[in-house]
Image (cartoon, rainbow, N blue to C red):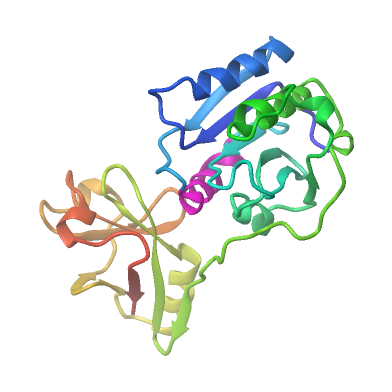
Amino acid sequence: MPNPPGLITLLTDFGDQDSFVASMKGVILTINPQARFVDLSHQVPPHSVDEAAYLLKSCYRYFPEGTVHVAVVDPGVGSARRPLLVTTSRYYFLGPDNGLFSYVLMDEDEVEVREIENQQYCLKPVGHTFDGRDLFAPCAAWLTKGTPPSSFGQIIHDPITLPIVQPSRQGNRLVGRIEHVDRFGNLISNLTLQHLEELHSVMKHRQLSVRIGEQIIEGLVVNYSEGMAEQPAALINSDGRLEIFVKEASASDLLKVGKGVPVEVS
């Protein structure tokens, strides 16, 4: 079980115009005044669980061991959906049972999932519309004070997971899709460097080409500066993913494509 360092990350779709995030931090600091925060993002599109799952996957592992990751994108708040505490060999995760932790459950070792049942660690009374403040924030604070996961509730074995689409091999082609469009309009796919290396080993001496929509991109560049204005290019980004970009512009706008669009490499 990881040792909590007092660091809590927050990922929500609450934005920054209302008091939601501040209320959560206030609850945490009331329980543990020594707690520290990192805001992963509060700009997740409203109710977009899959987008939050992707953002969490992209950065959680860069934090110190014992970090408590709180993710609250919760269209089902107040319903029968379960509040979860997920413990891995390095981290804690708190959030609703709606697929937010799909990548964590797939990628992490020694995963234990508990339903939060013990009302001792929640605000009184617990409301029906703001579990971020009333449930997940206080539980995060108690975790940073050393409360063991076993105190929060029973282990469950059937957490909800999102359907995670994996690239497929179709003859001499790899077919993936765009998983994320970042704020620069870069198109980030689910194709990895390993996928491309395996394809290249079969298609020896051929330059790989990338097809998205009607656009074909020949070969890969190494960095953004090697791209050309108003011309899509492709590279392997810092997360090891195939990314399509336009130098100092939006590939999404230029190509008029977004998340879920197929990408082929041949």
Position of the N terminus, as image quadrant, is top right
**Is 32 contained in the magenta span?**
no
Q: Nearer the viewer, residue 92 or 94?
A: 94
Most extreme residue toward the left, as rendered? 230
Look at the image and give the residue range highlighted in magenta: 48-62
Most extreme residue toward the bottom, as rendered? 171
The image position of residue 128, as x and y in percent, is 63, 35
The image position of residue 142, as x and y in percent, is 78, 23
Q: Nearer the viewer, residue 159 or 185?
A: 159
User: Could one spot residue 32 in this view of the protein?
Assistant: no
- Residue 40 is left or right of residue 252, and the answer is right
The image position of residue 162, as x and y in percent, is 58, 61
Position of the C terminus, as image quadrant, is bottom left
- Residue 222 is left or right of residue 157, and the answer is left
- Residue 197 is left or right of residue 100, and the answer is left
**Against 111, is 177 above or below?**
below
